[in-house]
């Protein structure tokens, strides 16, 4: 059985929820979950990937071009946004058509094969596939014309070369077609356990010689890895869009209408600039030890959070998410109601648990917040036996 973690990020409130879900068995029919059902249940479930363009977490804050668009669409239709990250490309369409998610937003190019599996919305970006190759070792000391001679610029020169790409990606089909077009074998190695960005990193590190990426992704990664080249195109321009179930016409129509208006709004281009043009800031976020893409820390208070989460028997990332929503990790935060610090604890509440220290002190604040969560757990355990269900009520009751 497969299990995955989902963070439910409230649109317009501070609530965050986490729970695990077991994938259902194969079904003969695709569940009918259209816009009316989504609005009734109060949440849009999006399938995406952990990448610098789609979705990542930086200092406890969810980010990404696709994520920001999804968040705004969820706000537009008046529901919460739930994010599920998926690693395997095939699983995107499997999860979509099993009703696990409502929309795929993962830098997907529109292809005939994918269009048989799902409907695509109007495109929101155009890209093309490019070859990712490594510059010569002493490239900084070489003139441009010499570097160019050492790189592949003509697809004909891919004959006999081994190119490593994600299994079942659109890159595989393009390389097969390209192999036919040049009348020679291109050795295609498909891998399951690596994302496109991880394969780009392997090219930079010298572990593989070539991979293929969408140009928008490749250009971002070029800012991280100065020793790669991404100028050789191997495809015509391709459209990037979101995918929905074929029996969700209302949702598709709503996204298209919203997207049409959104692209007229300067906010859309501000979001685009943030991730694809302001390269220095994006590099800082992605390379940070507080990024889910490169680091393994959420905040400087991780040791305190982990200790408290262990006593609560919670996933520490859930507690970190709660703290982010409460205070954005600002120990000096004070709400209009008088709640103080990282976990926004009222001084009166802290005193009930014997904590009289100043609540701007992270140690005292997290201790007080932990004790209050333990109290809520005891309160709800009498009514809700299932731990995961109980956590939802605890989070809803907090503050």
Image (cartoon, rainbow, N blue to C red):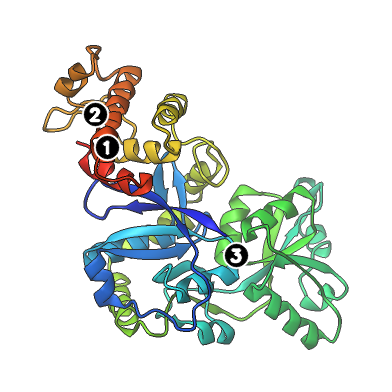
Horizontal arrangement in the rendering, residue 266 relative to residue 274 (left or right): left
Q: Earlier in the sequence, mark 3 or mark 2?
A: 3
Residue behind mark 2: 333
Instruction: Say what secondary structure mark 3 lies in.
Output: loop
Horizontal arrangement in the rendering, residue 282 relative to residue 354 (left or right): right
Give the CA separation, mark 1 to mark 2: 9 Å
Q: Earlier in the sequence, mark 1 or mark 2?
A: 1
Give the CA separation, mark 3 to mark 2: 40 Å
Residue behind mark 3: 88
Above-or-below relation of 317 to 203: above
Which of the 4 image quarters holds residue 174? bottom right
Pointer 1 and pointer 3: residues touching (CB < 8 Å)?
no
Q: Residue 45 in the image: state x and y as whole percent.
A: 37, 64
Q: Earlier in the sequence, mark 1 or mark 3?
A: 3
Q: Residue 154 in the image: state x and y as whole percent.
A: 78, 75
Above-or-below relation of 370 to 219: above
Pointer 1 and pointer 2: residues touching (CB < 8 Å)?
yes
- Residue 326, numbered circle: 1
Instruction: Say what secondary structure mark 2 lies in.
Output: loop
Q: Residue 235 in the image: state x and y as whole percent.
A: 65, 79
Mark 2 crowd level (few <14, some 14–19, many ≥20, 10 Å Cα):
some
Q: Camera-side residue: 139 or 395?
A: 395
Give the CA separation, mark 1 to mark 3: 33 Å
Of badges 3 and 2, nearer the viewer stands 3
* The N terminus - image quarter: bottom right
Mark 3 crowd level (few <14, some 14–19, many ≥20, 10 Å Cα):
some
Horizontal arrangement in the rendering, residue 361 relative to residue 302 (left or right): left
* The C terminus - image quarter: top left
Instruction: Say what secondary structure mark 1 lies in.
Output: helix
Residue under the point 55% across and 47% down: 293
Q: Residue 23 in the image: state x and y as whole percent.
A: 50, 64
Residue under the point 16% across and 32% down: 335
């Amino acid at each position: 059985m497969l299990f995955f973690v989902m963070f439910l990020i409230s649109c317009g409130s501070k609530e965050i929820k986490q729970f695990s879900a077991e994938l259902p068995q194969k079904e003969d029919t695709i569940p009918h979950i259209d816009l009316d059902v989504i609005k009734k249940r109060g949440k849009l479930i999006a399938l995406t990937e952990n990448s610098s363009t789609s979705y990542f977490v930086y200092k406890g804050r969810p980010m990404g071009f696709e994520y920001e668009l999804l968040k705004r669409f969820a706000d537009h239709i008046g529901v919460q946004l739930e994010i599920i990250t998926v690693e395997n490309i095939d699983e995107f369409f499997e999860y979509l058509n099993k009703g696990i998610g409502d929309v795929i937003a993962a830098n997907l190019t529109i292809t005939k094969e994918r269009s048989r599996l799902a409907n695509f919305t109007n495109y929101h970006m155009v890209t093309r596939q490019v070859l990712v190759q490594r510059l010569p070792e002493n490239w900084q000391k070489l003139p441009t014309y010499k570097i160019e001679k050492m790189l592949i610029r003509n697809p004909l020169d891919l004959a006999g070369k081994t190119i490593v790409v994600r299994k079942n990606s659109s890159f595989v089909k393009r390389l097969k077609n390209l192999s036919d077009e040049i009348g020679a074998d291109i050795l295609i190695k498909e891998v399951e356990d690596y994302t496109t960005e991880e394969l780009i990193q392997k090219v930079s590190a010298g572990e593989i010689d070539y991979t293929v990426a969408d140009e928008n992704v490749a250009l971002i990664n070029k800012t991280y890895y100065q020793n790669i080249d991404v100028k050789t195109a191997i495809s015509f321009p391709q459209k990037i869009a979101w995918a929905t179930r074929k029996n969700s016409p209302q949702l598709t129509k709503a996204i298209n209408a919203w997207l049409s208006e959104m692209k007229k709004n300067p906010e859309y281009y501000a979001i685009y600039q943030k991730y694809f043009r302001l390269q220095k800031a994006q590099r800082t976020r992605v390379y940070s030890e507080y990024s889910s893409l490169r680091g393994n820390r959420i905040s400087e208070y991780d040791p305190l959070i982990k200790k408290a989460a262990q006593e609560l028997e919670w996933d520490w990332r859930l507690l970190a998410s709660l703290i982010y929503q409460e205070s954005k990790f600002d120990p000096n935060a004070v709400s209009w109601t008088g709640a103080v610090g990282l976990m926004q604890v009222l001084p009166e509440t802290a005193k009930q648990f014997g904590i009289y220290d100043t609540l701007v002190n992270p140690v005292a604040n997290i201790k007080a917040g932990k004790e209050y969560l333990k109290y809520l757990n005891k309160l709800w355990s009498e009514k809700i036996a299932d731990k995961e269900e109980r956590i939802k009520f605890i989070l809803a009751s907090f503050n």
